[in-house]
Structure formats: structure tokens, C-alpha cells
Amino acid sequence: MSLPTSFQLRTHSMLLHMTEKFPAEGKPEARFVSIKEVFKMIASDKLSTALKKTFNPTGNSPLVINVNFDYEDDNEECAPL
């Protein structure tokens, strides 16, 4: 899955903010799940059902699906960096 750079920057910024706002303080941290992983969890089940095939999460599958998301203002938004 290919996501716009600005989305990845926002995700990282939010993670830093949440870590600062809610420090672990010795407690186990909540596991951060990336949008890519969430998409895989949802899409794999739906694709398995639609294709009537078993999903193999080990990555040894001959089927590869690429999903690209574009954001027209991505370059403009990242330019100040």
C-alpha cells in the first residue's frame, strides 16, 4: 500500500503527541497499528470471502495486490520540510 507522505507525517505526529500526552509510566504501551495493517486485516477477510480462498498471512502468496492512494496537495503540504 502506498500512502501520501503527508499522511505518514500526520500519523507520526499524532503518535508523538499521544506518547507525550499519555506516557506509559511503567505500564505496557498500547500497540500502535498502522493504517496499512488495519487495511490488510479488513481487506484480507473480505477478499478471502469474495474469492473463496484461504488467506495466507506469511507473505508466500502468488497473489499480490497493490493499492495506491494519492493526495493532490501532498507536495505542497510537505514543501516546508
Image: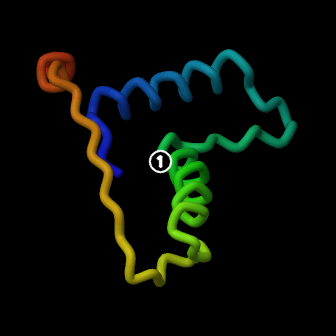
Instruction: Say which amino acid is labelled 1.
Output: Lys
Residue 62 lies, in percent from the top left, at 38, 83
Residue 10 lies, in percent from the top left, at 41, 24
Instruction: Pick the residue in front: 22 or 58.
Output: 58
Residue to which mark 1 is pinned: 36
Left or right of 40 on screen, residue 63 = left
Is 27 placed above or below 58 here? above
Instruction: Pick the residue in front: 46 or 71.
Output: 46
Residue 21 lies, in percent from the top left, at 68, 16
**Which corner quadrant of the image does residue 3 belong to?**
top left
At horizontal 60% and vertical 63% (from top left) the residue drawn is 49
The quarter of the picture where the C terminus appears is: top left
At horizontal 76% and vertical 39% (from top left) the residue drawn is 29
Residue 40 lies, in percent from the top left, at 53, 54
Is 81 placed above or below 35 here? above
Count of all numbered marks drawn on residues in the image? 1
**Which corner quadrant of the image does residue 15 belong to?**
top right
The scheme the figure's colours follow is rainbow
Instruction: Pick the residue in front: 26 or 50.
Output: 50
Q: What is the secondary structure assignment of the residue under circle 1? A: helix
At horizontal 87% and vertical 37% (from top left) the residue drawn is 27
At horizontal 70% and vertical 44% (from top left) the residue drawn is 31
Q: Is residue 57 visible?
A: no
Is 19 placed above or below 80 here? below
Q: Is residue 71 visible?
A: yes
**Which corner quadrant of the image does residue 28 belong to?**
top right
Tell me if mark 1 has few (under 14), some (14-19) or many (20+) residues whose alpha carbon lies within 10 angstroms of its own.
few
Is 53 placed above or below 41 here? below
